[in-house]
Amino acid sequence: MISTVQAVAVTALVVVGSFFLLVGTVGLLRLPNVYNRMHATSKAATLGASSILLATTVYYGPVDDGLAALVTVVFLFFTAPTGSHVISRAAQKMGVPFLESGDWPGTVPMQDDTEEE
């Protein structure tokens, strides 16, 4: 049996985690290009999943399943940014353009072919 404080903490963490996962999903569906979508999903999914995993730790305590959830949070915080970076670099190397006037750091700005000289 868990205490009232633990129940409130678990409920709050699950609600916060669900909110961030919902925001990440909406960002994935609504944002215009791979760079924006990648940013929305990596940030929101990391926070959402971490909150739900922390709720697991609060519920089960720092042993067995709770410890596995904590290890998963640490693993998630190392792999999500790395995955996002790899996706971003792959899109850039494939030639996926930024929106409007954005440029890849350290490169020559792309010339717009529609400009008249």
Image (spheres, rainbow, N blue to C red):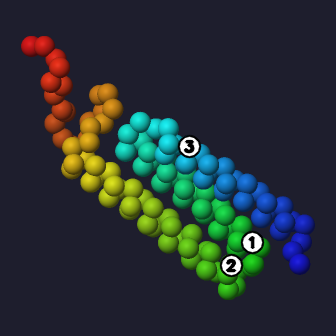
Provide the secondary structure element on which disc 1 rests.
helix
Label 2 crowd bin: few (<14), some (14–19), many (20+), radius 10 Å: some
Q: Position of residue 115 (x, y in %)?
A: 16, 17
Q: Image check: 1 left or right of 109?
A: right
Which numbered disc, 2 or 3, marks the residue closer to the eye?
3
Pointer 1 with pointer 2, Cβ within 8 A: yes
**Amino acid on which disc 3 is placed:** Val
Tag 1 or tag 3, which sits nearer the N-term? 3
Residue 65 picture quarter:
bottom right
- Residue 109, numbered label: none
Vertical order, 52 against 92 (above or below): below
- Secondary structure category for the residue under label 3: helix
Q: Is residue 7 left or right of residue 27?
A: right
Count of labels in the image = 3
Residue 26: which numbered mark, if any?
Answer: 3
Crowding around mark 3 (Cα neighbors within 10 Å: few <14, some 14 to 19, many 20+) is some
Kind of residue at disc 1: Val
Residue sitting at x 77%, y 73%: 59
Mark 3 in CB contact with mark 1 (< 8 angstroms): no
Residue 41 x/y as whole percent:
49, 51
Above or below for 13 versus 108: below
Coordinates of residue 49 in the picture (x, y in percent) = 60, 62
Using the rendered image of the protein, determine whether residue 105 is visible from the camera's viewpoint: no
Give the residue number, with chain letter if any, for mark 2. 66
SS at badge 2: helix
Residue at figure coordinates x 71%, y 67% from the top left: 55
Query: x, y percentage for residue 89?
Result: 28, 53
What residue sits right under mark 1 in the picture?
Answer: 58
Q: Seen in the image, is 117 located left or right of residue 3? A: left
Name the residue rendered at 51%, 67% in the picture: 76
Q: Which amino acid is tagged 2?
A: Gly
Examine the image and state in which quarter residue 6 appears: bottom right
